[in-house]
Amino acid sequence: MSTSTVGTTAPSPTPARPVVPTRSKAYWAFNDSVVMIQRHIHHLTRNPDQIFTAIMLPTVMLLLFRYMFGGAISVSDTSYVNFLAPGILVVSITLISTSTTLAVQSDMQEGVVDRFRAMPMFDAAVLTGHIVAAVIRGGVAFVVMIGLGLLVGFRPAGGVLEWIGAIAMLLLFAFALSWVSALFGLIAKSTEGASGLALILMFSPYASSAFVPVETVPSGLRAFVEYQPVTPVVDTVRALLLGEPVGSSAWQAIIWWVAVLAIAAPLATRLYRRRFA
């Protein structure tokens, strides 16, 4: 018997490891943001009370001013419901800021962010989810308020371009305001504190041209009403939807809210990272 082959068997080759595709940071940041957006959309479908709240209050205000106070308010060149409806659209967006502030503050307190921070995910994805959810709620409120406005007599005269311009202005306003709301949610130390800070945004349209012409405001308050950042948004949306000249209000609104966005977004992101560093 030959012994030449004992102990000479060649070792089997090590199987090659699967090649993991390399992704860029931008890809993972986008992917994590999409996951967070899906999380908030899931919350919206499971908790329709958020949508109900975003619709109920502006609906009550529209009906209240249309049928109870409208007869006592005089506007020129158009009916009061045409004057009021664009203002209600802006009001409906400011009302959703309360939900955003409370949702961000709740995430900070309930520990879910601590869990996210323990995972290899893009930091700002959590805030991105809140911001996009707020814009979605604003879009739903916009559609409902337009439909309800038409039912109570609102007759817009703007063309397609004017509608696109009005929607773009409202989107910029909602986006910038949502970042301010998220910033307030990060600053607040409790639910009560978050509610108080959200009221600042929620009541800002009441001291604007949303409900009454600026010319009817007492002189001591008129300068504030005329130059505060919500008034040019209301004036621009109203002019576009009614097919009237926009004037300088569009540029004023863009400058105001791009500046607010440029300050609030990086400040909120930096505060979020510092708080959970």
Image: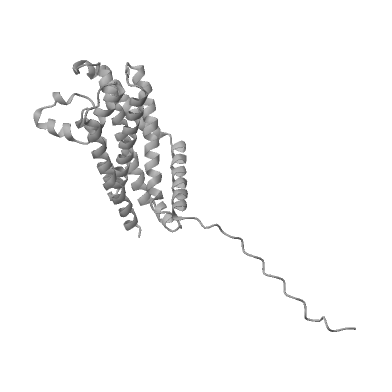
**Residue 250 percent coordinates (x, y):** 25, 32
Q: Nearer the viewer, residue 228 or 106?
A: 228
Question: Eyeballing the image, is 267 above or below 19?
Answer: above
- Place of residue 155 in the rendered image (x, y in percent of width and height, measured from the top left): 32, 17
x, y (%) of residue 197? 25, 43
Name the side, left or right, on which 142 lies relative to 193: right
Nearer-the-camera pick, 187 or 123: 123
Report the quarter where the N terminus lies.
Answer: bottom right
Residue pictured at 28% horizontal, 46% vertical = 262
- Left or right of 53, for residue 207: left
71, 159: nearer the viewer: 159
Q: Residue 181 falls in which quadrant of the image? A: top left
Residue 218 visible to an observer of this rendering: yes
Q: Quadrant of residue 12?
A: bottom right
Name the outermost residue toward the right.
1
The reply to whether residue 203 is in sight is: no
Who's the residue at 81% across and 81% down the image? Answer: 6
